[in-house]
Structures are given as structure tokens and as C-alpha cells.
Amino acid sequence: MTLFLFGISLLGMMAGVVLLILGFIKKKKLKGGIVIGVSVLLFFVSLLMPAPEGSKEKVEVASKTQEELNKEKEAEQAKKEEEKKALEEKKAKEEEMIAKKEEKEAKIEEERKAKEAKLKEEQAAKAKAEKEAKEKAEANKQKTETKPEKIQTTTKENSNVTLANEAKKVITDKLGKKNNQKKDTVKSYAVTEEGNGKAFIVELNANENFTVNMTKKGMWMDSKKILELLNKKNEFEKIIIHWYYPLIDTYGNEKDVLVMSFNINKATLNKIKWDNFLTDNVPNVVDNYFEHAALKE
């Protein structure tokens, strides 16, 4: 309403001015002054009237819009802070994961080193045990062995030589005079006195086979054949067997090395049922069994 009165007053004042000018030109009274007076009155009335509700609403809307802008700005700022916080938390988690991974890797490395140290200790203990067993076997060999060239020409010793030659023939008839490496099957042999009986000592060159395990089992098998035949002769109180096999040392030199040795007495031989006896049980029934580390690979 205020705007309407304001507009009418302005138009009225303009119309009054026009009428005054026309009246002045025509020298007639055209009531222009009255129109101007009424228009001025309406003008003051429009100024004194309160502002319409619409304008207040517009101010309020403008005010509300500013508040919303402030809230949006605050919300955006809060969102940025949350994103920054989330980024920091993510970074902290990643650093924690990296630390745990490094700790786990360090633990694995420590366990690996511990296993290596334990394995070295076991290998050292194994090597020591093998060395002691070998030394024991060598000592036993030196103690019980008598080389053929040391046999004297007495009647009793001549009898031992004859018995030794017969035992050698039993072996060569069964295993052959040469092994598959073209070496003499019987390396050396002798018969010595053993308590109230005799002991037969023989050194043999082993056959080569496809694998280390097959070579070792070949020695057991040939030992079984020899023991069965010599036991049937019923001449010996003890039988001592030494097996030799070519090995290559650190410098590349090949040499026949004692790789297996054992002895077995007559009482044990008489217990064996040869038809049912398993070759793999040879190490279990003999005494002073020695096996070189090369046969355990």
C-alpha cells in the first residue's frame, strides 16, 4: 500500500506541474495547484506509513541467508578438520603397520639365525660322533687285525693261513674276484686267534651302485652272503669285515677309504635264520658297527 501511495503522489505532482504550465500558457486556472497539493500530501503519507511485510521478510531472508552461509562455512571448515584428522589417523595406522611388519621380519630373521646356529651345533656334534666312531673302529681294527705278511711259518700259523685262504675262496666264489670297479674284491684277509677260537678278518672293496643308499645296502647284502657261508664252515668264533670305497678329498684326490666296518660273534650268527633274515637288519645284529658320513648323504 505504501508503494502504491508513493507512486500516485509522484504521478500527481507531475500532473499538477503540467496543469500549472498549461494554465500559465493559456492564462486559465486548470487546478494544477490543487493536484500538486494533494500529491504532496499523499507523498508525506506514504513516507509516514510502516514498511510492508514483504520487505521485512526480504531482510529476514537476507539475514537468514548470511547465517546459512556462515553455517556452511563452519561446516566446511569442520569437514576439512575431520578430513585432516582422518588423514593423520590413516598415516598413523600405516606407520604402525610398517613398524609391526619390520618387527615381524626382525623376529623371523632372529628365528632363522637361531635355527642356523642350532643346525651348526647338531652338525658339529654329528661330525664329532662320527669321528669318534671311526677312531673306535680303526682302533678295533688295529687291535684285532693281523696282516697276512705277519703270519709266521709255524704249524699253527700255517693252519691259519690255510683257513684264511679257504675263507677267501668262499668270498671270491660268491662275490667274484673283481668288483664292478675292476678292483680285487678281497683287499686283504687273515685268521687270528680269538680266545678259545679263531677270528677271520677281511678287507673288501665295495661295488659302486646308482645311489649312495643303494651302494650302502649293497655292502649289507654282500655282508649277509659272506656271513651265511662262513657261518656254515663253523670255523670262526668271530668275523670282522671292513668295507672300502673310493672317495674324493678336499683337494680332488681319490682314495680308497674305510666306509663301513663291524664284527659279529659265532653265538649271534647261530641265532640268525638266514632264509627270513632281512638285509636291512645287518647293522642291528652286528657289534661295533661303523658307517662313514659319506654313506649317510
Image: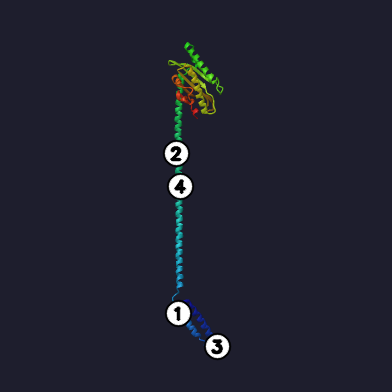
Residue with the mark numbered 4: 97
Please give the residue where the numbered disc 3 appears in the rendered image.
26
The amino acid type found where label 1 is placed reads Val
> Dot 1, crowdedness within 10 Å: few (<14), some or many (≥20)?
some
Q: Which is more N-terminal, label 1 or label 3? A: 3
Q: Are marks 4 and 2 in contact (CB under 8 Å)?
A: no
Q: CA distance from mark 3 to mark 2?
A: 124 Å
Q: Position of residue 79 (x, y in %)?
A: 46, 58
* Residue 97 appears in the picture as rendered: yes
Nearer the camera: disc 3 or disc 2: 2
Label 1 belongs to which residue?
45
Q: Nearer the viewer, residue 204 or 64?
A: 204
Q: Residue furthest left?
A: 195
Please name which of the two marks, 3 or 1, marks the residue nearer to the observer: 1
What amino acid does circle 2 point to? Glu
Q: Nearer the viewer, residue 6 or 208?
A: 208
Task: Pick out the residue farthest to the top.
Answer: 155
N-term-proximal mark, 4 vs 3? 3
Image location of residue 9, percent across then percent down: 49, 80
The answer to whether marks 4 and 3 mark residues whose Cβ atoms lie closer than 8 Å is no
